[in-house]
Amino acid sequence: MSTAKTVPVLTIDGPSGSGKGTISALVAEQLGWHLLDSGALYRAVGYAAGAEGLDLSDAEAIARCAETTRIRFVAAGKGHPARVMVNGHDATDELRTETAGAAASAIAAIPAVRQALVQLQLGFRKAPGLVADGRDMGTVIFPEAAFKVFLTASAAERAKRRYKQLKDKGLGVTLANLLREIEARDERDASRAVAPLRAADDAITIDTTGLSIDTVVAKVFAIVRP
Ligand code: C5P
């Protein structure tokens, strides 16, 4: 039996729209490894806090909410992202909005919220391996991971990608607003005191600007299976 510590981990961190979610899902599927979408956890807590009518700046109330919110990923079949259940409610669609992203970013700056989600995240490390997608996977949650990638892309390209994703999901957004929101979220994520968005010292950075999904997947594969 492999203990959790011997299970290989590939961390994929980066700012919003860098392609993390898409790349992590494809690589996990091709490797047959588990997938941790840690952003969904922060989105879920932000969503639960909103549903309870909590003030997002009330650190104590939000931390309690993070400790008590039940979050479950339910497989939706090959090629489909898992559904996210929050306190028994399928909140997948609500969690994808930029409003949910902004709420997640606000509550993610609260240290006790991050602490409340640590064990849950470590629990995803199961054989045969884990692909962990987030902001602090390689720096805080899995610092000893064997493989670490940091994905970046220009803000303009990231905004364009998010625009397409949200449009495809039928959500009304404008490119200019999205660019502003993405820049504000990145700034907050990178400048917060706890677990700021940054590449681990031993991460390999891939700038995905202008690269196709297949090219990026191949680059990540070259790191895990050289
Ligand atoms: O990756 P995603 O856009 O779903 O993340 C939403 C927000 O959750 C991020 O802007 C960030 O503030 C927060 N987050 C985090 N740490 C992670 C993953 C996400 O702080 N590991």
Image: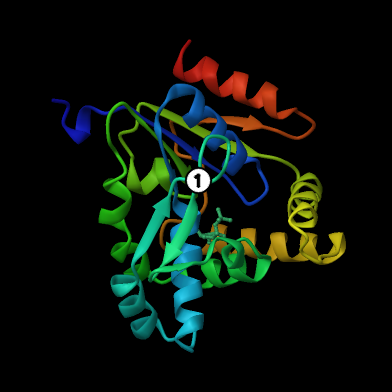
Residue at 41% x, 53% y is 73
Residue at 74% x, 50% y is 165
**For residue 224, side relative to residue 14 (left or right):** left
Q: Tag 1: Cα neighbours inside 10 Å, few (<14), some, or many (≥20)?
A: few
Q: In which quarter of the image is the N terminus?
A: top left
The answer to which image quadrant residue 137 occupies is top left
Q: Residue 161 location, x and y as percent? A: 76, 46
Q: Does any portion of residue 214 appear in the rendered image?
A: yes
* View extreme (front): residue: 77
Q: Mark 1 points at which residue?
A: 76
* View extreme (left): residue: 1
| Chosen colour scheme | rainbow
The amino acid on which the numbered mark 1 sits, given as a three-letter code, is Ala
Q: Residue 181 location, x and y as percent? A: 72, 66
Residue at 53% x, 36% y is 25
Q: Does any portion of residue 109 appear in the rendered image?
A: no
Residue at 51% x, 81% y is 50
**For residue 207, side relative to residue 86 (left or right):** right
Compared to 10, does 169 lie above or below?
Answer: below
Viewer-proximal residue, 63 or 192?
Answer: 63
Q: Residue 135 location, x and y as percent? A: 49, 50
